[in-house]
Amino acid sequence: MVPILLILVAIAAVVAVAVAAVSRVSIELEETIAPALLEVDDAVEAVAEAIPYEVSAVLSHTDVDQIIRWVLDWFDSLGMASDFGEELGGDWVEADEAVGDEISAVDHAVARAVSQRADLDAVHVTVVVDEFLRYLRDIGAIGDEADVNE
């Protein structure tokens, strides 16, 4: 009878230690941000499906892809993008802080459209950029607006 009681106490102790360890790690991981993986083809498909009919009737998937790549170039120029497996904010980032806002993303994409693709309407580019930024928020690649005054 005593050996069974010791075995039950040992099992209970092992389970208690395991629960405590998992709880501690869960609390630590709760504070971290999971990296987001952006698949450009998936983003193009999602954005092309999300934009209003009036815009999708004018723009092709190639146009949406081009606009998304302009926004990604803008993120890269700010130091807010990384290649697969590369740490964001590593030694390759020149500025100590990299902050981007949606208006600047739209401005950059519209400026590229005006200079490289006169056939693209600024309103259509703005709609695509807005949907792309919504997609990035949905996959966790970007967060809410940061308060840079603090």
Image (cartoon, grey):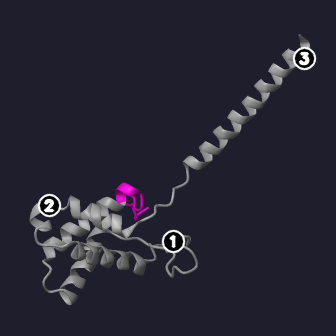
The residue that mark 3 highlights is: 3
Specify which label sits upstream in the sequence, 2 or 1: 2
Q: Amino acid at mark 3?
A: Pro
Viewer-side residue, 33 vs 50: 50
Viewer-side residue, 148 vs 126: 126
Q: Amino acid at mark 1?
A: Phe
**Looking at the image, do the residues carrying marks 2 and 1 touch, with CB atoms under 8 Å apart?**
no
Q: Is residue 66 left or right of residue 16?
A: left
Indicate which disc residue 84 carries. 1
Classed neighbour count for the residue bearing mark 2: other residues with Cα under 10 Å, few (<14), some (14–19), many (≥20): some
Mark 3 vs mark 2, CA separation in Å: 71 Å
Where's the C terminus, which quadrant? bottom left
Q: Give the vertical position of 90 relative to 12 (above or below).
A: below
For the stretch drawn in magenta, the main secondary structure is loop
Q: Can residue 10 be seen here?
A: yes
- Region rendered in magenta: 137-150
Q: Secondary structure at mark 2?
A: loop
For this orientation, the residue located farthest to the top is 1
Q: Amino acid at mark 2?
A: Pro
Q: Is residue 105 left or right of residue 10?
A: left
Indicate which disc residue 52 carries. 2
User: Which residue does the image show at 49% across and 74% down from the upper left?
Assistant: 82
User: Which residue does the image show at 39% across and 57% down from the upper left?
Assistant: 139
Q: Give the vertical position of 50 relative to 6 (above or below).
A: below
Specify which label sits upstream in the sequence, 3 or 1: 3
Q: Is residue 149 left or right of residue 1?
A: left
Q: Which is more foreground, mark 3 or mark 2? A: 3
Residue 117 rendering spot, x and y as whole percentages: 18, 86
Q: Give the vertical position of 93 relative to 144 (above or below).
A: below
